[in-house]
Image (cartoon, helix red, strand yellow):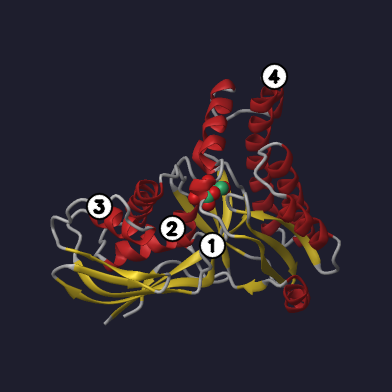
Amino acid sequence: MTVVIVPGRVNLIGDHTDYVGGLAMPCAIDLAVTAEFERADDIALTSDATAEPAVYPLPDLGALAEDATMWHRLVHAVATLLPAARGAHGRLTTTLPIGSGLSSSAACTIALALTMGFAGDKRELVLLAQAAEQRATGVPCGVLDQLAITHGEAGHACVVNAAEIEAHAVPIPAGVAIVVISSGHARALSDTPYAERRREAERAMAEVGGLAGATVADALAIPEPMLRRRARHIITEDERVRAMVEAFAQHDAKRAGELMLASHASLKKDAEVSTKDLDQLVDALSTRRGVYGARLTGAGFGGSAIALVASDTADAIAETFGGRVVVPSAGARVVT
Ligand code: GLA
């Protein structure tokens, strides 16, 4: 029996920037998809998230049924895109809530790739998982989640550079903890304006000649107000990620918290990806003793908020808000 553990992630800062080559600072967490399997000639995999097993012959899987469930779509996409996919009989279980903005889809595709014998480097795994998720869900996701999940280290966040498809770990300052709170609205990104936001962001970046070197003044010179706001979000969010890296290096949790609140305001007003529930959650968190900062995490449109808090207040804050403390953890790994 082989066991693969693939964590989800929270994003501390830098959302709706990866698909235009921006920066982000996520961290892998201690909620994960676990795959347990034996090598076999074909694929027969069950998931605790769905009743139906996914059974496919190899090497020719055959076509995907038109009414295939998301579980089948994910298995089929990974097996089709992975060169020389190997057979496996086993099951996937998850402690990651699905549709909560904690990258359950990316964790699932990466767990499936490792289960089907993926043998390349991290960059190849990131690109394979992104392609499989895009194919299965139809959502034009970036590489943030996959980079966080493959590069996670215990006690660290990752600085993600989406343009370079690169990530490196940076220590999380001592004395701070991360609390995740669900907005109560689980969603599939395919049912949200995510793809529309990506297209708008691409148009906005075309107006300023690309993100590299673009300034807020460039954004403000865009004639169309919506594109101006989108560009301003991306350019200022990238600056905030750089400032966050600096704040962590200086062990300055107060500054990190301020940056998170500014990020949320920008995601709300300029990127327009927040919801009333997320805004209320962030407002309530931000006035609570022990909270340095809070923001929505990931794509928004529902999902979860996170708060950066003083460690000794974390359990009480999690309890008050019905959330949970998550621990920055190691990335995807084969354990046996
Ligand atoms: C989702 C996508 C990522 C990224 C975030 C928003 O998690 O999968 O690629 O775009 O939304 O930052």
Q: Percent x, y for residue 298?
A: 58, 53
- x 56%, y 27%: residue: 205
Q: Secondary structure beneath disc 4?
A: loop
On-image quarter of the C terminus:
bottom left
Sequence-wise, the earlier of marks 3 and 4 is: 3
The amino acid marked with disc number 2 is: Ala
Q: Is residue 266 toward the left or the right of residue 301 in the image?
A: right
Mark 2 neighbour density, 10 Å: few (under 14) some (14–19) many (20 or more): many
Sequence-wise, the earlier of marks 1 and 4 is: 1
Above or below residue 116? Residue 239 is: above
Q: Are marks 3 and 4 in contact (CB under 8 Å)?
A: no
Q: How far apart are marks 1 and 4 (CA)?
A: 35 Å
On-image quarter of the N terminus:
bottom left
Q: Distance between the residues labelled 1 and 2?
A: 9 Å
Q: How far apart are marks 3 and 1 (CA)?
A: 29 Å
Decide if ligand 1 comes within 8 Å of the CB at mark 1. Answer: no
Disc 2 target residue: 106
Disc 4 target residue: 221
Sequence-wise, the earlier of marks 2 and 4 is: 2
Q: Distance between the residues labelled 2 and 4?
A: 37 Å
Q: Are marks 1 and 2 in contact (CB under 8 Å)?
A: yes
The amino acid marked with disc number 4 is: Ala
The amino acid marked with disc number 1 is: Arg
Decide if ligand 1 comes within 8 Å of the CB at mark 2. Answer: yes
Q: Is residue 181 toward the left or the right of residue 72 in the image?
A: right
Q: Nearer the viewer, mark 3 or mark 2?
A: 3
Q: Percent x, y for residue 28?
A: 52, 65
Disc 1 target residue: 9
Q: Are marks 1 and 4 in contact (CB under 8 Å)?
A: no
Q: Percent x, y for residue 262?
A: 76, 47
